[in-house]
Structure formats: structure tokens, C-alpha cells
Image (tube, rainbow, N blue to C red):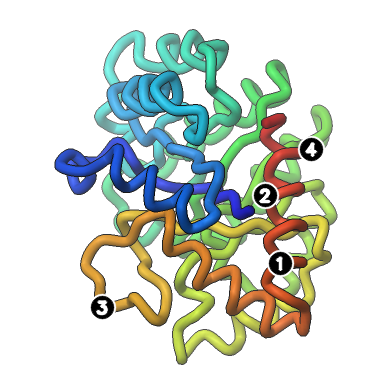
Amino acid sequence: MLFDTHAHLDQDEFDADRDEVVARAVAAGVTDTLAVGTTVATSEKCVALAANSPHVHAAVGIQPNYVHEAGHGDWDAIVRLSSAPGVVALGETGLDRYWDDAPFALQQDYFDRHLRLSQQTRLPFIVHMRDCEADVLAMLREAANCGPLRGVMHSFTGDWPMAAECLALGLDLSFAGMVTYKKSQPLRDVAARVPLDRLLVETDSPYLSPEPVRKVRRNEPAHVVHTARLLAEVRGISLEELAAATTANARRLFGV
């Protein structure tokens, strides 16, 4: 069994065959997929998807590149959605200096809101991080001063010192298709050092297709098996052991 801990099943890339995508995932041994929201509208759609399938769970939140589009009442809507059936996480949230679509101070404001809501609800949070490692760590450290952290660094691409601090703060690390790419040996070296009980796998579909399906234009949850197989190889364990551990970790973190 495998658990895809990050997929954007709400997106229109899946509109034509969403049920078949979920069925293919289950047939491939991916028994659980976390559908992750990026806005209020997409979060609502993720909640609806979770209600429609026992194999899909929902995360609700406002992703940093969309915070400038949030309207009056959108955050209150996320707070309400956090208690909806099938919701097991908050996010994705975090910070992004690469795209720079939203004012950074506003990104920090919304990241802080997700962190505080997580501490209030005990729902884990999902962190998006791009070109802002020091900023993310600073906010995580500040939040940790107010209470324990439960969450995951999604599609982790940082170095080992970054990974070690995230682990020390209580976070799990999730790896997506990029860890399978030829140029990603430094990232594989990091993945090999993460304690097995703190490791997660994801697709971030429809993005980041792993080898050997990298040329496929649309990634989907069934493809997480390729990332899991690579992680098992670099750690010197069987795919079955890797799958069992990462699935148990995801079920623990998300309370599934």
C-alpha cells in the first residue's frame, strides 16, 4: 500500500477522467490520496472529492501564490472547512519568493494563520517552500515557541541542515518526482538520511512526473510508486518495506 500525500485532484487536468484516475491509483496499490487545496474554491472541491471516495482525503488552505487573491471572508471559510468531514490537514501554505506573485508580508501573514490554526485544531499543516528556506524556518521556529508543530515539508528539495532542523521541529519530509531525476543526487543523499518513520511520498500531481514517466504531460497518484521505488533503492530496503513505513507515517500524521 502507498499513500500519495499531495495531489491536486481538483484541477481541470483531471476533469475528463477523475474517477478513473482514482481507480488507477487504487489498482496500483495507492490506497489513499490527499487532495490539497490552494484557494477556498479548490479547498471546497477537495472536500467534495473526499466525500465522494473513501480513497481520497482533503486538505484545505490558501497557497502563498494565491493569498493576494483572497477575498473578504475567505480565511473564515477555510476555518469553517477545517472541521468538514474528510478534512485531515491544512494547506497548502508556506512561502514563495520564486514566483513573487503575492506581497511577501501577506504570504507571511497567511502562513502564520495556518500555523496557528493547526495548533488550535491539531490538524497537521502542509508547507510549500520555494527560494525562501531561511524565511520558512524563521516562522516555524517562532510558531514552535507557542506549541508543538505537526506538519509536512511538501516536495522537499532542501539540503541536509535544512532537513535536520525541520525534523527537530517535529515535521515530516515528503519527496516528490524531483528526487528521481538524474540531476538530483544531492536530494537523494538527503532522502537516504531521513529517519524512516519521518518519511513521506507524494506526486504533487498533475506536476513533477517521476522517472520513468517523466515525459507524460500529466502526473497522477498512481505514479507515486516510481518515487517510492527510487527511495527504497537509495535506502537499501525493499519497496514493500518503504511503502509500509511511509503509509503508516501518513496515516499517523493525518489521522486516517
Image position, residue 211 (x, y; %):
41, 80
Between marks 4 and 1 in the image, the one whose residue lies nearer the viewer:
1
**Residue that label 3 marks:** 215
**Residue that label 2 marks:** 138
Disc 3 is placed on an element classified as loop
Quadrant of the snapshot with the C terminus: top right
Label 1: how many residues lie within 10 Å, few (<14), some (14-19) or many (20+)? few
Q: In the figure, 196 relative to 35: above or below? A: below
**Residue that label 1 marks:** 240
**Residue that label 4 marks:** 144
CA separation in Å, label 2 and label 4? 10 Å
Q: State which tag comes first along the sequence, 1 or 3.
A: 3
Q: State which tag comes first along the sequence, 4 or 1.
A: 4
Between marks 1 and 2 in the image, the one whose residue lies nearer the viewer:
1
Label 3: how many residues lie within 10 Å, few (<14), some (14-19) or many (20+)? few
Between marks 3 and 4 in the image, the one whose residue lies nearer the viewer:
3
CA separation in Å, label 3 and label 2? 37 Å
